[in-house]
């Protein structure tokens, strides 16, 4: 079974939530960006938590048949980028989240409400 971007976004957000990620937001970029259909943005309170969130997202997506294209920034754990194709997950250390404020950069994107 091939996962669609909506499913991948939901799996990533749920995995982040299960690892107690803070301020989880999904931005719908369809029609706005060619980079991805969704950005999922969240934060951890420590390097260890950022890495745990990232690892859980990768594990869950792969278990469901999704494909990981790459991970950047895992070792430093300040801003980890998880490339899942049409979904890109940004896992920030809480100290970096407000500094980069990527939600503001993509303010024309629709925020996805989680059920």
Image: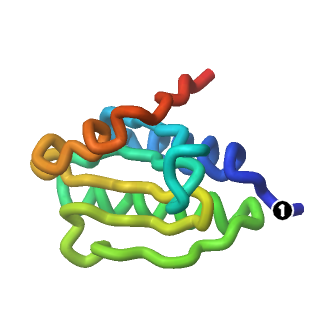
Position in image of residue 111 (x %, y %): 47, 29
**Residue in the image at 37% along x and 55% along y:** 90
Q: Which residue is mark 1?
A: 2
Quadrant (top left/top right/bottom left/bottom right) for the N terminus: bottom right
Horizontal side of 29 relative to 49 (left or right) equals right
Residue most extreme to the right: 1
Other residues around mark 1 within 10 Å, as few (<14) / some (14–19) / many (≥20): few
Q: What is the secondary structure assignment of the residue under circle 1?
A: loop
Horizontal side of 67 relative to 39 (left or right) equals right
What is the basis of the colouring in this image?
A: rainbow
Position in image of residue 37 (x %, y %): 59, 50
Position in image of residue 7 (x %, y %): 71, 46
Question: In front here: 43 or 32?
Answer: 32
**Residue in the image at 60% along x and 66% along y:** 85
Say above or below: 109 vs 51. above
Position in image of residue 25 (x %, y %): 42, 35
């Amino acid at each position: 079974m091939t996962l669609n971007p909506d499913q991948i976004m939901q799996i990533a957000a749920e995995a982040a939530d299960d690892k107690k990620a803070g301020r989880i937001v999904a931005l719908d970029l369809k029609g706005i960006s060619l980079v991805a259909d969704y950005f999922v943005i969240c934060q951890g309170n420590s390097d260890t938590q950022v890495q745990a969130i990232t690892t859980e997202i990768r594990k869950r997506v792969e278990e469901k048949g999704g494909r990981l294209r790459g991970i950047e920034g895992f070792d430093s754990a300040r801003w980890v980028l998880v490339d899942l194709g049409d979904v890109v997950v940004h896992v920030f250390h809480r100290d970096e989240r407000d500094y980069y404020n990527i939600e503001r950069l993509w303010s024309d994107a629709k925020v996805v409400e989680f059920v």
